[in-house]
Amino acid sequence: MQENLYLTFVFLLVFLAFFPNHRRVVKMRLMDNLDEHWMNVALEAAREAADIGEVPVGACIISAEGALIATASNRTITDSDPTAHAEVLAIRAAAENIGNYRLIGTTLYTTIEPCVMCAGAIVNARISRLVYGAADPRYGAVDTHFGICSSPLLNHRLDITSGILTDRSRNLMQDFFRAKR
Ligand SMILES: [Zn+2]
């Protein structure tokens, strides 16, 4: 009997010690699943870019309420427009969709780390969170170079998550450039 009480006490202690942490882990897992879900939407857009001979980068934007408000693929060659990167096109479409030039509370998913231009557009749009798949060792301007989305010199900073479905994003790029050679 006394042994049972002792065991219950130990169990309670262990439970109390781990419960808050456990809840955080569950929340993180849910976040990861959601991030993977939306990154898959961005990856689908990246594949569409590859299909028309564009560098395979895709992006999508999710509203504060969790709804998909824009999807875009890279279209620089197709549109003869050096600014037609997936992120910029997604920002334009999302702003038009909600009728507001500020995308406060939104999350932008993109398969590859944004360049200087896109990182700047993301800051100007006041996007709240950026999630990207693979780092871009050459042009990445978020974590690799410049740190544009977290610069104290700018008036807006956002949450940044990287490493979501990284291999798939990177493989799309590598396959594309390998086929070109
Ligand atoms: Zn860009």
Image (cartoon, rainbow, N blue to C red):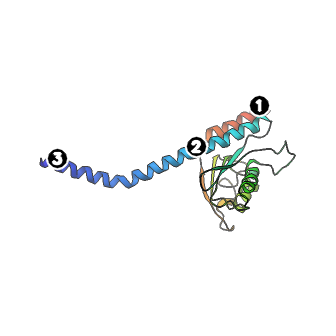
Residue drawn at x 74%, y 40% is 56
SS at badge 1: helix
Q: Is residue 171 visible?
A: yes
Q: Which residue is mark 3?
A: 4
Sequence-first disc among 3 and 1: 3
Q: Which mark is residue 85?
A: none
Tell me if mark 3 has few (under 14), some (14-19) or many (20+) residues whose alpha carbon lies within 10 angstroms of its own.
few
| 13 sits to left or right of 146 | left
Q: Which residue is mark 2?
A: 36
SS at badge 3: helix
Image height check: is 74 above or below 97? above
The amino acid at mark 3 is Asn
The amino acid at mark 2 is Glu
The amino acid at mark 1 is Ala
Task: Pinpoint residue 98: horizontal percent, then vertical percent.
Answer: 71, 57
Which picture quadrant has residue 95? Answer: bottom right
Q: CA distance from mark 1 to mark 2?
A: 27 Å
Task: Pinpoint residue 4: horizontal percent, then vertical percent.
Answer: 16, 46
Q: Residue furthest left?
A: 1
Q: Are marks 3 and 2 in contact (CB under 8 Å)?
A: no
Task: Pinpoint residue 155: horizontal percent, then vertical percent.
Answer: 68, 68
Q: Can you tell which of label 3 and label 1 is closer to the viewer?
A: 3
Task: Pinpoint residue 29: horizontal percent, then vertical percent.
Answer: 49, 46
Q: Which mark is residue 179?
A: 1
Ligand 1 within 8 angstroms of badge 2 C-beta: no
SS at badge 2: helix
Tell me if mark 2 has few (under 14), some (14-19) or many (20+) residues whose alpha carbon lies within 10 angstroms of its own.
some
Sequence-first disc among 1 and 2: 2
Q: Can you tell which of label 1 and label 2 is closer to the viewer?
A: 2
